């Protein structure tokens, strides 16, 4: 723990009560810090979209004491059904081929709820509160916070920006978002539907896909069905930034314009979105910074390294990044900035690998032309063939090694050194099972 004047306990402010923020708050508390969390939302968020928690994330969850609360929401014998715009089935792939068998399929709210329940009582959370001004000092950070009771100016020894891809902390300390945001010119819209469309049952996973537009509908266990759409921005007749504004202003209208010619389940899905409302609208983009820290200010999670949903690594990176932050700071009790530098050096290779994997897989995830779409369908048809499925199962088991099903590192076996964790290391294995089936 950092030594401060009069042996005062060092204070940290974490901005954002999501996965990265809650993990960082617990980690810093364990390292001996007094931690506060401020969150823009008026109350704790629940639900959320579908995520895949890679083994490295499970190991971090175990070290945070929350892995016991996490369960997969897709059955092991589930089927991923691919359909075209006419509603015709073009592939049926066993869900076990699409994932690392050591990973978990859940919704983002599961992670946040587990981290919230395990949060130390001493970690105070201030809802409906945001930083309005951040002023880095030599040995601390002055922050003006706006909350329900007005504004207050406070001094902290460390400020952690875990406030997502549209980070306010990053904008105030590192510069405007336009300098770091790299667009894919794709729009993503997600929603939680009020009911299952058609004759779908719990555990079904349906993927309507055509050139430049896909949808993923997950009928997950114990949760309302989740759907997310990704499509090329130019299908709205504008560039990426303008497309995001138009989609945010009228998400249902944008979806009906892009997917209105789809048959099968799509009309009922769109009606469900209109009834329930959307939960997230944005363009798909990566955040790339030369450094995630400025003095006593550090960025964690999507605020620092957002690799996009195409990487399938966002939740694992957030958990590992937040959980290891306190560890590295604790290893440098007399020099907080040295601890932050060590943390960044250890974590950056994994984040860069995930971002690189996302750039490679984005065209397969959202086919940009007829050739890529044809190759994607051919690959899925091969995977749908039972003999080919057996071969892929064997390859998956070989790639998973001894830490396969039931043996994820950090959950039931030895915990790897937290400084050697590399979430990007499984990307090659996942490509064997088809990046088109990866989930955000």
Image (tube, grey):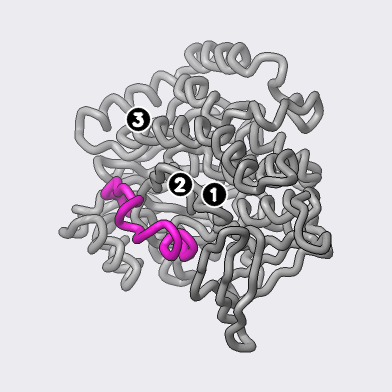
Which comes sooner in the sequence, label 3 or label 1?
1
Q: Position of residue 369 (x, y in %)?
A: 20, 35
Per the model, the C-alpha gap separating discs 2 and 3 is: 15 Å
The numbered dot on residue 301 is 1
Mark 2 or 3: in front is 2
Q: SS of the residue at dot 2?
A: loop
Mark 3 or 1: in front is 1
Per the model, the C-alpha gap separating discs 3 and 1 is: 21 Å
255 left or right of 418 in image: left
The answer, for residue 389, to whether it is visible in the render is yes
Question: Is residue 179 within the magenta segment?
Answer: yes
Crowdedness near tag 3: few (<14), some (14–19) or many (≥20) residues, C-alpha within 10 Å: some
Crowdedness near tag 2: few (<14), some (14–19) or many (≥20) residues, C-alpha within 10 Å: many
Q: Tell me which residue sits at (59%, 57%) in the image.
A: 160
The numbered dot on residue 360 is 3
Point out the stretch of residues depicted in magenta.
167-187
Q: Tell me which residue sits at (73%, 52%) in the image.
A: 28
Q: Residue 67 occupies which quadrant of the picture?
A: top right
The numbered dot on residue 367 is none
Above/below status of 55 relative to 286: above
9, 278: nearer the viewer: 9
377, 9: nearer the viewer: 9
Residue farthest left in this picture: 237
Q: Position of residue 347 (x, y in %)?
A: 56, 35
263, 323: nearer the viewer: 323
Q: Which residue is mark 2?
A: 306
Q: Are marks 2 and 1 in contact (CB under 8 Å)?
A: yes
Question: Is residue 37 within the magenta segment?
Answer: no
Q: Position of residue 63 (x, y in %)?
A: 77, 39
Q: Residue 364 occupies which quadrant of the picture?
A: top left
Which comes sooner in the sequence, label 2 or label 3?
2
Q: SS of the residue at dot 1?
A: loop
């Amino acid at each position: 723990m950092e030594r401060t004047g009069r042996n005062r306990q060092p204070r940290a402010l974490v901005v954002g009560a999501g996965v990265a923020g809650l993990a960082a708050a617990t980690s810093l508390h364990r390292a001996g810090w007094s931690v506060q969390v401020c969150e823009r939302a008026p109350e704790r968020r629940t639900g959320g979209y579908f995520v895949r928690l890679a083994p490295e994330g499970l190991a971090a969850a175990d070290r945070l004491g929350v892995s016991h609360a996490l369960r997969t929401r897709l059955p092991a014998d589930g089927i991923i059904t691919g359909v075209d715009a006419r509603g015709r089935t073009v592939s049926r792939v066993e869900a076990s081929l699409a994932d690392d068998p050591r990973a978990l399929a859940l919704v983002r709210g599961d992670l946040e709820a587990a981290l919230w329940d395990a949060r130390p009582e001493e970690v105070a959370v201030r809802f409906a509160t945001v930083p309005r001004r951040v002023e880095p000092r030599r040995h601390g950070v002055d922050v003006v916070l706006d909350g329900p009771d007005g504004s207050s100016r406070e001094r902290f020894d460390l400020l952690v920006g875990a406030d997502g891809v549209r980070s306010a902390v990053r904008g105030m300390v590192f510069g405007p978002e336009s300098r770091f945001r790299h667009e894919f010119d794709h729009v993503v819209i997600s929603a939680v539907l009020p009911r299952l469309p058609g004759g779908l049952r719990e555990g079904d996973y349906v993927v309507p896909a055509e050139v430049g537009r896909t949808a993923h509908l997950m009928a997950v266990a114990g949760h309302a069905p989740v759907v997310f759409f990704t499509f090329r921005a130019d299908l709205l007749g504008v560039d990426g930034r303008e497309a995001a504004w138009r989609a945010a202003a009228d998400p249902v209208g944008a979806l009906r314009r892009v997917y209105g010619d789809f048959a099968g389940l799509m009309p009922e899905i769109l009606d469900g979105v209109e009834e329930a409302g959307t939960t997230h609208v944005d363009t798909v983009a990566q955040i790339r910074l030369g450094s995630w820290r400025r003095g006593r200010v550090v960025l964690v999670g999507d605020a620092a390294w957002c690799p996009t949903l195409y990487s399938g690594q966002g939740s694992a990176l957030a958990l590992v990044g937040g959980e290891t932050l306190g560890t590295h700071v604790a290893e440098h009790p007399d020099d907080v900035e040295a601890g932050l530098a060590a943390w960044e050096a250890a974590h950056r290779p994994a984040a860069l690998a995930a971002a690189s994997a996302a750039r490679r897989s984005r065209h397969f995830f959202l086919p940009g032309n007829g050739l890529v779409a044809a190759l994607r369908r051919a690959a899925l048809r091969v995977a749908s063939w039972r003999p080919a499925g057996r071969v892929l199962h064997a390859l998956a088991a070989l790639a998973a090694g001894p830490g396969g099903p039931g043996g994820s590192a950090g959950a039931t076996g030895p915990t790897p050194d937290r400084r050697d964790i590399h979430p990007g290391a499984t990307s090659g294995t996942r490509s064997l099972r088809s990046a088109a089936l990866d989930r955000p």
